[in-house]
Image: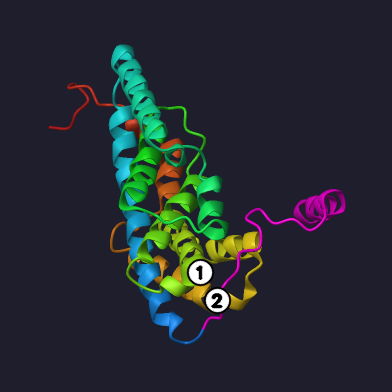
Amino acid sequence: SGVIASGMMAQLLLGSYLYLGFPNLTPVGVSMLPIALLTGAITGLMGAGFGRSLVSLLKRRLAIQNPKRLAAITIGCGIAMAGFAYLDENNSGTGVTVITSFLFDGKEASLSLVATRFFGTMISYLSGAAGGIFAPSLAIGASIGAYLTNFVAAEHGNLMVLLGMIGFLTGVTRTPFTSFILVLEMTDRHSAIFPMMLAALTAQSVSHFIDKKSFYEHVKERFLSPESDKPQSSAAAPS
């Protein structure tokens, strides 16, 4: 009820509005389905690997009790992110401008952009001042999808961006239906619903080869069992 009421109020005040606008898509045929499978597999594996790596690094950070070391890590992360932003402003932020530049300005993705979005999000999160994982995951997936157009489906550049977003977010969250519906509703591209669904389900399937649990499941378990992150003393350690 709350979602419906807020949606109607937004339409009333803002009119027809989409978060990512109305990107143009080349008509999609059956030949695009294998490419959707491939994109979903690649981004799903990378999304799962991203989540697993971030959980591992987060556990190490939480095990550090020395305030000076924590301060040094935070400062180091800040300097690293400042360096990324200095090299290219698209390397920082939530990534909305990056996604829209792919969809509407014809911007090409480089391997360095993929790497800086991927590792930059980790660095930002480990600093302790991160704004979140959800939106940056969409930007990482969009960068991967755009980069893959250098090898496949160059004529479907915008669709590849959308498939990358769906696949990577699915790999991180393990919510395939939420991922493809989210991107579908942000772009209103119902003509590509089948490749979107296929990429989401493929990403969901392959991500289990990297980690059985999603990033958010690991975080939930940490919050429910906060004592598990504290290092055991030698006296309490099992023999």
Considering only order in the chain, which callout, 2 or 1, is on the residue closer to the N terminus?
2
Look at mark 2 in the image and give the residue it sits on. 26
Tags 1 and 2 in contact by the CB under 8 Å rule? yes
Residue 34: image location, x then y, percent? 39, 81
- Please say if 21 is above or below 98: below
Q: Amino acid at mark 1?
A: Leu
Residue 202: image location, x then y, percent? 40, 72
Q: Amino acid at mark 2?
A: Thr
Residue under the image location 47 percent in, 87 percent down: 30
Residue under the image location 43 percent in, 27 percent down: 128
Q: Outermost residue, bottom direction?
A: 30
Residue under the image location 47 percent in, 50 percent down: 139
Observer able to see residue 84:
yes
Look at mark 1 in the image and give the residue it sits on. 159
Residue 11: image location, x then y, percent? 82, 55
Label 1: element kind: helix
Whether 91 is among the magenta residues is no
- Please say if 114 is above or below 88: below
- In three-dimensional space, the C-alpha distance between marks 1 and 2, rounded to whole angstroms, equals 8 Å
Residue extent of the magenta highlight: 1-28
Label 1: few (<14), some (14–19) or many (≥20) C-alpha neighbours in 10 Å: many
Q: Nearer the viewer, residue 28 or 52?
A: 28
48 on left or right of 26: left
- Please say if 202 is above or below 81: below
Observer able to see residue 205:
no
Residue under the image location 82 percent in, 50 percent down: 14
